[in-house]
Image (tube, grey):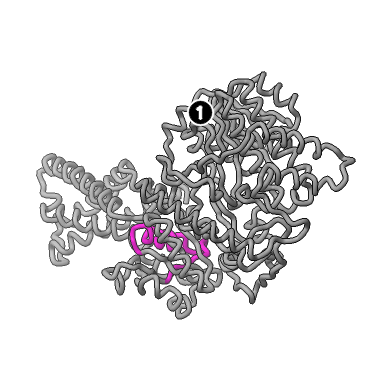
Amino acid sequence: MKYHQRLLVLGAVDALVSVLVVVAAYFLRFDFQIPPEFLNWLPEVIVGQVLINLLVFMRSKLYLRVWRYASIVELVAILTATTISQVLFFAVFEALEMYTGELVVPMSVYLMIWFMLVVGVGGSRLLWRIIRDSFLKQQPHHLRTLVVGAGSAGAMVARELRQKGHSSEFYPVAFIDDDPMKQGLAIMGLPVVGNRYRIPEIVEAQDIQKIILALPSISKEEVAKVIEICKSTKASIHILPSVAELIRGNMSMRLIREVRVEDLLGRDVIQTDLHGIAEYVSDQVVLITGAGGSIGSELCRQILPFSPKQLLLLGHGENSIYEIEQELRSTYPGTPLVTVIADIQDRERMEEVFADYRPAVVFHAAAHKHVPLMERNPAEAVKNNIIGTRNVAECAHQFGAERFVMISSDKAVNPTNVMGASKRVAELIIQSLDRVSQTKFVAVRFGNVLGSRGSVVPIFKKQIEKGGPITVTHPEMLRYFMTIPEAVQLVIQAGALANGGEIFILDMGRPVKIADLARDLIRLSGLEPDRDIQITYSGIRPGEKLYEELLMSEEGMTSTQHNRIFIGKPTQFDAAEVLNHVEHLREIAHDKQAVERAAQIKQAMQRIVPTYQFMAETPATLELQMEAMKRLQQAQKEIAAASLTDK
């Protein structure tokens, strides 16, 4: 409703209330027998009351308030405005009495008018809200909703949903809360029907179609436990994630979103040392290779707020670099961005970039990462992941960069595939350079990243959209997962901890079965696994492991000042021998006439990485995979022990 319409409607209501209040006050004062001397002045009293009230109410901005959100604040505003209006009314008519010498308004009538005016004006404002709430019934498009959490956030959610009325798809019917003091009570007119363990029973009994988790202040681990209970129901799950928005009082429907896979990981927000990051990034030229990729683009987003002197976005694909450039320029107008289209395999081009811009900090995220593709194209893995890394790293050394941080992979540990072996060779290259360079060369090793290009989550979602089936390689396939922002924060933090030569290992939490992840995604889509969407098993692909590892047995692990970052102890190796083997690999990869080039590449990699075990075009045996699982469990114990020691 526009202001002039609001003014017209509410002004008419207030005028009517003013008239009724004056008449009622006189009738009550004189027992419905108003004396003639007061009755003669009654029209002037009514007109005066109406005009003074409307003038004061307009000046007090009562007509600018949205009364469907009426609260104590609005009632105080009404009390203030009516008091001011009655003080003016009293002053005007007292002056009139002094001028005429007649008693116009008895003193008791002033008090009665004031009291009834407060009740009448306040009541008229609340009446619409009462009527609206009373007649707001569930519509055909409404979905019966259970709100988990009957605290302030839950109450705000219920209130917002009710106020949205017909425009909302949610229709709140009850609360769930673990606090026994709240159970059995009603909040916002909705009953608190039990604790989290009654969710499946309540969903079934009350035909609940949606569940909203209004638990912004509890830990992610606890939220994950509640989600685990909700997953056993047929209701779709939504969440209110941001306590910061609630603190600022910005509660709105846009904050309520569907539960995502990362909510199931039970991981609290990482605390990052912002000062440490600012010290080595601020006012520096920073180069990010692979800047158009999932990790590279997120590195750009998180580094820009620390005010680098220049941020170089280097990538081979022009479309992805263009997209991240446009995003960053719209988010950070006037930011010192430089886009560089280049292939890290081109040594001359790399030298040209380093000579022109002299980056002080290099984040090397450019890599081929898809295991099956690299297994079929091992020469490209060598060219990009190994030779490309050598090119960028040697240029960082040659042109005096201060830090070089390479993004590695858990697949580099005891690799069984070309991609993992190529990453391990890249780790050895930068460790070799660190021995002779002033540049601090480090690698950061972590597992799968949720939502990155080619990760299982987007693939599974597409399969669900098509009606299934979801394809999983093996029912026991286990992987570590992190969110993209989480992984990148730890990568940047690891750069601040770098002394040179380290391989930083990120605490990925507990590993997740891919089959369980598939079932979770099906349930989060409101469907039932093995009924609405089938899960099929295709068998382990060449080079795949059942279980990924974070470190080799000879590396061991030490803690850092950050409780989510650990250091794998450097292994002993002959740097000159490694670099000679790398040169031999380069020759094989570029020799298109080589007989059985793929097999030669794998054999040459194995000479550099003795733990690389491959079986040509056949899956690794389950016995080998179970050995990997034992090493994985040992690594988890070491991480837990290091965390306790650090604390």
> x and y percent of residue 317 in the render?
73, 37
- The foreground one among 58 and 21 is 58
Q: Residue at x 70, y 46 (%)?
A: 606
Residue 320 image-quadrant placement = top right
> x and y percent of residue 19 in the render?
28, 56
Q: Total of numbered circles in the picture?
A: 1
Q: Is residue 156 magenta?
A: yes
- The foreground one among 60 and 327 is 327
Residue 583 image-quadrant placement = top right
Residue found at the far bottom of this picture: 205
Residue found at the far top of this picture: 356
Magenta stretch bounds:
150-173
Q: Which residue is drawn at 53% across and 39% down?
A: 570
Answer with left or right where residue 126 lies relative to residue 436.
Answer: left
Residue named by callout 1? 281
Residue 334 visible at all:
no
Answer with left or right where residue 389 lies relative to residue 505.
Answer: right
